[in-house]
């Protein structure tokens, strides 16, 4: 039997994603009731790059399933000692039943999956993919809105550097949403991914440099870092323009929801947290059932 | 005006190269000043099918599968003739495969394939060639430098 990995959103079909969503729904129940599905499986989090939230969320999901989570963050030192990445993977592969990996190099998870005999889950490979984040985003939208097809989704912020936004655009296209990309000049989404999504899914994609939420059903925000600008005055001006001020929300639909991959800094002011639109904490909570569903699937679970 | 090139006893002839790409084909074949065999590059000659075309004739090299895949990146549909004992022993079109394996390095400096030894893979898509590791898309010319 071919082992299952989760490396890229590009490897998943719509039906597979929908199956994961219905499984995640069941996992929400299981997490509440305390139902366990495994008792002898080890989930190994191998994080070459720190990411506290993703790491903890995978560990909590593993524990909820009844698996034993183990985490290891290789220090730069052990890399300097000269052990190759592939040697590290082979060794860890011998310790566990599934490897969850984060690494700064793009394609590292795919590479690891070709070496490891156990399933590999990509928890972020540089600027490339972070598929469980995309699944959480899509799951949150479909859970709150009851659908994704036909929704108007606005992605706002630095769309050039945000990995989450690229995969999300792909997922939104797959599920038939209409997308507005709002980014400052110079921080626009890579045209290669826009063209890919348009061509593959026929997605309606609008490009703009001005935040206007009038028709939005979903607003997805990511940070604009001032380090991206040479001129500090320009940086301040752009940051202010792309901060989600309560005035922006006055034009928005009553039931528009705001999502954010978290951690957020000042791109969403605190007073917005209390508004009915803010759903990013709920989104973060959805990380547990989605990661439970993914782990359950790659481990070949049954009885859910 | 006609240009005559003497026949070769053993080597390769690549015909129907898109006009202007002949020099690049020589580069793929690794032809430099040190090369001692006979080489002919004919550029911009009239072709019934293509209008204009380039032709490369090279002595002493029998182009293998991988090199042919590489040539397909810049000269798709070129025709390749392998000559042995003054006879054409193999004649085929240079066709871009669906997946290019081990043919070119990934130009992305952050791609794992430039750090770990593994065969590079590029899937041919409508927009270009997608690296199976970093998933970025490149144009054929980018993979040759
Ligand atoms: Zn690559």
Image (spheres, coloured by chain):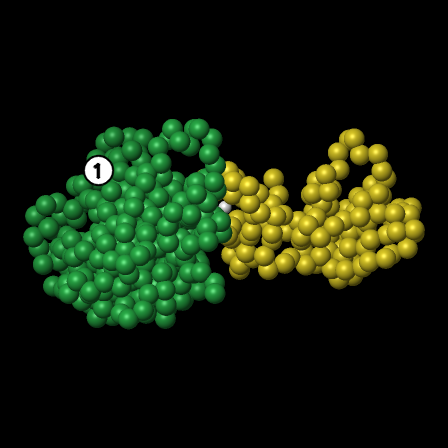
Chain colours: A green, B yellow
| Rendering quarter of residue A181 | bottom left
Q: Residues within 10 Å of mark 1 (few under 14, many from 20)?
A: few
The residue lying furthest to the front in this view is A40
Judged left or right of residue B105, residue A28 is left
Q: How far across and down, in percent of the image, does residue A49 sit?
A: 33, 39
The residue labelled by disc 1 is A237
Q: Which of B15 and B117 lies nearest the eye of the viewer?
A: B117
Q: Nearer the viewer, residue B17 or B62?
A: B62
Find out if the beta carbon at label 1 lies less than 8 Å from the nearest ligand 1 atom: no
Q: Is residue B86 above or below residue A203?
A: above
| Res. A139 in view | no
In the rendered image, is residue B14 in sight? yes
Where on the picture, by quarter, is residue A31?
Answer: bottom left
Residue A262: percent from the left, percent from the top? 21, 47
- Measured as percent of width and height from the top left, residue A286 is found at 21, 58
> Residue at left 47%, top 65%?
A1
Task: Please determine whether, in this image, residue A160 is positioned above or below residue B32.
Answer: below
In the rendered structure, the answer to whether residue A276 lies left or right of residue B123 reads: left
Residue sitting nearer the eye, B34 or A213 = B34
Towards the viewer: A170 or A29:
A29
Residue at point 10%, 50% (across, down): A273
Relative horizontal placement of residue A179, taking residue A236 as reference (left or right):
right
Is residue A254 positioned above or below B129 on the image? below
Secondary structure at numbered mark 1? helix
Relative image position of residue B108 (x, y in whole percent): 49, 41
Subunit ID for the residue under disc 1: A
Give the position of the C terminus of chain A as an image quadrant: bottom left
Q: Residue at x 46, y 45 (%)?
A: A90
Q: How many marks?
A: 1
Picture residue at 88% right of the left edge, 51% below the top: B84
């Amino acid at each position: 039997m071919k082992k299952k990995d989760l490396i890229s959103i590009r490897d998943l079909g719509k039906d597979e994603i929908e199956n994961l969503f219905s499984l995640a729904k069941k996992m929400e129940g299981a997490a509440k009731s305390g139902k366990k599905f495994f008792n002898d499986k080890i989930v190994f989090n191998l994080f070459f790059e720190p990411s506290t939230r993703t790491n903890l969320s995978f560990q909590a999901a593993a524990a909820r399933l009844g698996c034993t989570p183990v985490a290891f963050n290789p220090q730069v030192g052990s890399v300097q000692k000269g052990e190759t990445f592939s040697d590290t993977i082979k060794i860890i592969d011998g310790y566990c039943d599934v490897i969850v990996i984060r690494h700064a190099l793009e394609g590292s998870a795919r590479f690891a999956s070709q070496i490891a005999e156990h399933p590999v889950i990509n928890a972020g490979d540089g600027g490339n993919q972070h598929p469980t984040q995309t699944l959480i985003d899509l799951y949150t939208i479909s859970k709150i809105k009851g659908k994704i097809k036909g929704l108007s989704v606005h992605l706002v912020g630095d769309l050039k550097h945000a990995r989450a936004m690229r995969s999300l655009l792909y997922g939104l296209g797959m599920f038939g949403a209409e997308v507005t990309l709002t980014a400052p000049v110079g921080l626009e989404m890579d045209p290669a991914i826009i063209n890919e999504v348009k061509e593959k899914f026929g997605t309606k994609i609008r490009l703009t440099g001005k935040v206007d939420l009038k028709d939005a059903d979903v607003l997805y925000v990511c940070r604009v870092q001032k380090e991206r600008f040479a001129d500090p005055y320009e940086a301040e001006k752009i940051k202010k323009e792309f901060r989600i001020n309560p005035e922006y929300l006055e034009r928005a639909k009553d039931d528009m929801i705001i999502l954010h991959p978290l951690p957020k800094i000042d791109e969403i002011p605190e007073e917005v947290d209390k508004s009915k639109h803010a759903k990013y904490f709920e989104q973060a909570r959805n990380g547990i059932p989605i990661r439970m569903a993914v782990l359950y699937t790659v481990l070949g679970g049954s009885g859910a | 005006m006609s240009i005559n090139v003497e026949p070769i006893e053993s080597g390769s002839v690549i015909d129907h190269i898109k006009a202007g790409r002949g020099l690049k084909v020589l580069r793929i074949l690794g032809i430099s000043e040190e090369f001692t065999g006979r080489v002919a590059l004919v550029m911009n000659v009239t072709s019934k099918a293509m209008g204009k075309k380039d032709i490369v004739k090279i002595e002493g090299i029998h182009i293998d599968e991988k090199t042919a895949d590489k040539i397909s990146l810049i000269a798709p549909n070129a025709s390749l003739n392998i000559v042995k004992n003054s006879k054409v022993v193999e004649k085929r079109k240079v066709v871009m495969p669906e997946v290019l394996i081990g043919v070119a390095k990934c130009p992305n400096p952050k791609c794992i394939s430039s750090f770990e030894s593994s065969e590079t893979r590029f899937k041919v898509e409508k927009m270009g060639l997608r690296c199976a590791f970093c998933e970025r898309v490149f144009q054929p010319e980018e993979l040759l430098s």
